[in-house]
Amino acid sequence: MNNYILVTKYWYWLIAVGVFLLLFLITNLALLYYRKKKILANLSDFCDKKGYRLTVVKRKTYDYIIEVGEKNFFIKTAFVPLNAAITINSKDTWNLAYGGSKNRPGRGYSRQRYLDELIGFLRGDFPGVKVVLIYPTIDKVQRYLNESEIAILTYKDAAHGIRFITYQDWERHFGDLI
């Protein structure tokens, strides 16, 4: 009888954990859908105002193509958490460090991961300008020049032929990418 009670308690916990994981997955998928929809609406409005042509791409290493006259901009979206920094180690190795706080300066970022979702885009050879659109924003983007020197990059700089711009700076500074 005691074994039956023990097994029943575990089943309740397993069901509770399963429901929690399912809700977590649904929330993340809904958040991703919302972000993509927001970015598409913003890019569409921007391109309509400027007279550019926007193409949404599926099943490629990039998400959008913006045609500005004869130039094509191949855009890949990178979703990053707030208070984060990107370090460009090489052409196809981008490291995201996050978990920092603006309220505690001098403290480093507590977590990091490689932006593996960008590798196909970074290695790709496209007949135009490659741009990484960082959503929503980033504290800094830095690039290793050699083993001991790091340069802080802005949207005006290219790293290995790849440009980047944040979602918040998109409308103000897209003209600088052209």
Image: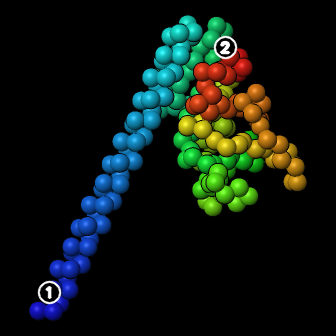
For label 2, the SS is strand
* Quadrant that contains the N terminus: bottom left
Which residue is pictured at 15% across the width and 86% down the height?
5
- Extreme residue in the front direction: 103
Query: What distance separates the C-alpha of mark 2 from that of mark 1?
Result: 70 Å
Report if residue 161 is visible in the image.
no
Residue 161 percent across, percent down from the top left? 75, 31
Q: Which residue is mark 1?
A: 4
- Percent position of residue 152, x then y: 79, 41
Question: Which amino acid type is shown beneath numbered disc 2?
Answer: Lys
Residue 8 located left or right of residue 45: left
**Residue with the mark numbered 2:** 71
Please identify the residue farthest to the bottom as the structure is shown. 2
Q: Residue at x 53, y 25 (%)?
A: 64
Percent position of residue 124, x then y = 65, 33
What kind of colouring is applied to the model shown? rainbow
Name the side, left or right, on which 53 lies relative to 138: left
Task: Give percent across and percent down for residue 140.
Answer: 71, 43
Rendered view: 90 above or below 36: below
